[in-house]
Every structure is written in C-alpha cells, then in structure tokens.
Image: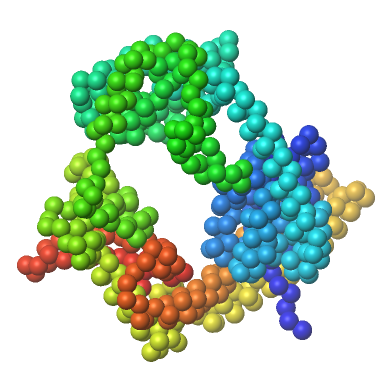
Amino acid sequence: MGQPKIYNAALYLRLSKDDGTDTESSSIQTQKEMLTRYCRENGFIIADYYIDDGYSGKNFNRPNFKRMIGDIEDGKINCVITKDLSRLGRNHIETSIYIEMYFPEHRVRYIALTDGVDTESGSAMDITPFKNLLNDMYVQDISRKVKSALLARQKQGKFIGTKAPYGYQKDPADKNHLIIDERFAPIVRRIYAMARDGMGIQQIKKVLRAEKIPRPVVAAAEMFDFYEKYCETDESIYAWSMGSVREILQNPVYKGAIRGQRRPKISFKSEKRKSREDAETFVVEGMHEPIIDPEEWELVRRLVTSRKRTLSPNVKPYDNIFSGLVKCADCGYAMSSARAHKTWNDDDISANYDYYCNSYRTEGTSLCTRHRICASELRRVVLEDIKRLASEALSDDEGMIASIIEQLGDNTESEIKQAEKEIKKAQKRLTELDKLFAKLYEDNANGEISERNYKTLSANYEREQTELENKIHELSETISANHKNDENAVNFVDLIKGYSDIGELTQALLNTLIDRIEVHEPEEIDGEYVQLVDIYYKFVGMID
C-alpha cells in the first residue's frame, strides 16, 4: 500500500459586491475559518491564503488569484480549496476550464466545500457545470442591469467616469457634472494653441517635457492613491507621452460635450475594450463649461487628423509575427518594428524593417541604446535555432531531456528520497504534538499544571509546530520542483520534435514555442561586430 499523498493546499477566498447581501455567511473571516478547520481535520498542509477581497467573480483578473496560479506553475501547491464554486469564479466558461482542464493538467486537486465538489473523488462533478452556469447567469443579469443604467445616464449627458478628464474636476454638488479646474485648464489651452499653430503631437510632447509641465496622472494622483506610483520621481511627473497629448486634442469634453460608448467592454466576461467607429459613439453637446471654444476644437481636430501618416499604396505593410515577444536585453522594454532606411525589397518584406528598443526610440540614449536588429535577420536566427533543437530532439531525445533537466537544476534521486524521509518524520512529530496539546489542555483544565507552565509549554509546542510545517513546505517544494523540471523537459522535447522541417515562421508557431526573445546591443569582439540573441522557450527557458 502506497504512502498517502501530501497536499500543499492553497486556500482561496474571495468576496465582492457581486455576491449579494448575504455577506455574513460568506465573509472573508468566515471562509478562512471554514477552510482552515477543514485542512486541519483532513491533514492538509496550508501552503498559503490567497485573498481577493472586493474583486468580482466575473473574471479572473485578480491579484491573489494570479499569485496562486503562479505558485501552481512553480510547483508550490497541488491543491486548491474554496468555500464554494462561486468563490473560484462566476464565469462558467473560464471556471470550467480551470476545474476540468487547468487543474488536472497541473495535477492540482480542487475542492469546493459547500458544493461537495472534489476532483480527486469525482463527487458531484456531474452537477458542477450546471452550478457554474447558474453563477455565470447571476453575474450576467447584474452586468446587464448596470450597463443599461449607465448607458441611460450617458445619453442624458451625465459624466460617469471614475476620474475627471485633465483640466476638469467633478462638481462637489453633482458628481455627474464637470467643472473647470483652473490649475490644469491653462495647460490644456496651451496644448490646443500649439496644435493650432501647426505643431505636431511629438513636438508638443517635447515642449511640455522641456518646460516641466505636470502630466495628467499628477492630477489623478491627487484623488486616487493608485496613481501615486506613477509620480514618484520628478522625471515621471513631467514624462508626457504622445498618447496623452493626442487624447487631449481629440476628446470632445474640452468643447463642453460628453462622449459615450467610446470603448465599451467586449462582453461582461472580459475586461478588454474595443474602440468604436465614430458612427457607433454618441456625443451630447453643451453639458458643461468648455475649456476650448467649440469652433477652435473642431479646427484643431481637423489639423491633427490631417497630419496622420499613411503608407504609400505601393508599400506593403510588415507582418510583425514577433509582436509581444521581442525585448531589450538591457532595459527589459519591448522592441518595436520600424521602416528601415534602405532600398525596398519586394521579395522579402521583413528585410525592409528593423527592431529598436522602445526606450531608445522614445527617450534616446539617456535611457538605453538602439539594440537594432533587422527583422529578416531575427527571423533567420530564430528559425535556425528551432530547427537545430528539433533535430537534436529527434536524434537523441533522452540525451536532450537529461541535458535540459541538468540546466534546470534538478536534484539527485538520493536527495529526493532524503526529503521524503524527512517529511514523513516531521509529519509523525506533528501528530505527536497534537496529542501533547490535547493532554496539556486537559491537565490545565483539571488544574494539574500551573498557568505559567501551561503557557510556556503551549508556546514551545506552537513554535515547534510552525517550524515543522515550514520544513515540510520547503521539502515539498524541493520534491515538486524536481518533478516539474522532469515534466517540463519531456514536454518541451516532445513539442519541439515536430518542427524539424519547418520552412518559415508564423505568429502561431512562435507563441506556441517561445516565451520571449531578448536582443543585446551589438559589440565588437576580435575586430568583428557580434550581436547576441537569447531565445527563452516555453517550459524550459533558454537552452545553451
């Protein structure tokens, strides 16, 4: 008979306004006590508490949920416990994906106590999808009602934003009405004056930075602590962006109007927003005092729009298949593609474009250097490396797996066995301490031990318990990391085998295989310029 499995449990707790008025039975403290008691009664090790208080269950963009997923990826936990299914989430599609796909794939047991769900035993799993659907419908109904109410208020010309636009503030007597903030309104007028005089957005941005004029986030930081992190240095206070300038020059709020439905959410299940065409938005005129005369606003809008650059009909656009993957190896910022100043090559469009560090492109050499690499050269390097690894995997998959495991820092078999032995010993001592605690409590209740001795012994036992639990957690992490490294190496080798004969790269292929690509600044070595490109693959990172 095998040893009972050790469970390092993540106790996930969540509560928000979505959850109705019965908050007492679902309070964070109530959830915590219930889950803690369950772990103690069933011998689960509590890896950590993951608490998202005030976060909606309609999506999974929650800080502590993300932290929990990160710990699952790192092999720190192999069990997730919630009070009920709705604590995990109210979006039935994503919740089902986690329960039926993600958790099983990562060998994580999931338990929802009051719903009787346990993926280990399969209990109540048949009814789980229906419970998730009901939770989803509950949030969908709330979302529809809220959206309808907000849309009605927008069509009345009421301002419903969280923070007022730069140059305005919310009217103390009516939070849905805007009044001019004379501290920042002159800056808005100055921006429009520069645009009216023919200056482009880039030029305006440089003037604002040079004159050290505070950017819009400074005004926001006065009202919301969240924005203070963007104003921690003098440099960040004046770091105007082209996007900030463009938004001020295009927002009809400055002519006294309210614009509605500009970037609605794709759906109640997603935080992503889409830009609507002008015909799909609506503007309610004359709702507050304008900072810019309506006629001047229209004039500036036409000037800004006419300055937009368009590609020549004969210039083919570059398909940036590396979007989101290429990073600067020195500053960590993304690298973006731009048209190179060279003779146009119709046979290879990528030969006409280069990648540059975004820090360098926006701030110059004060922050970073160019790190320029030709797009066609980057394609060649990545394609050759993928084919090289695929060939190695096909010729000696076991050797490659062993090599990757060694790079990942695998532990020896003897170390693993020793860790398992120490865990067993620590668990045995914890059981003994539980019995000693019970005896100590009984002796104290019967007056057979002084209060002073009771407190001293109790403190010693608790200290030893904490030390043992921490030791078990650390040893379990060592074992889990070992198993995960083995699994990741095998997964990567199996994955890369199928790409030995590829002729060209695609965005789908890159996103399947690669986590990120770091490009170094070229340097001179022995009279030749050499540029290093580090490719970090999914599962295993960079392979030497």
Percent x, y of residue 271: 55, 43
Q: Can residue 177 be seen in this view?
A: yes
Task: From the viewer's perspective, tell me whether residue 245 is left or right of residue 256.
Answer: left
Q: Residue furthest bottom?
A: 395
In this view, 140 is above or below 73 = above
Which image quarter: residue 55?
top right
Percent x, y of residue 130: 78, 56
Residue found at x 23% / y 30%: 200
Task: From the viewer's perspective, tell me whether residue 444 is left or right of residue 498.
Answer: right
In this view, 331 is above or below 235 = below
Q: Residue furthest left?
A: 527
Percent x, y of residue 519: 27, 60
Quarter of the figure that contains the N terminus: bottom right
Nearest the viewer among 165 and 117 is 165
Residue found at x 36% / y 81%: 500
Q: Is residue 211 visible?
A: no
Residue found at x 37% / y 55%: 324
Task: From the viewer's perspective, tell me whether residue 484 is left or right of residue 25.
Answer: left
Nearest the viewer among 328 and 179 is 179
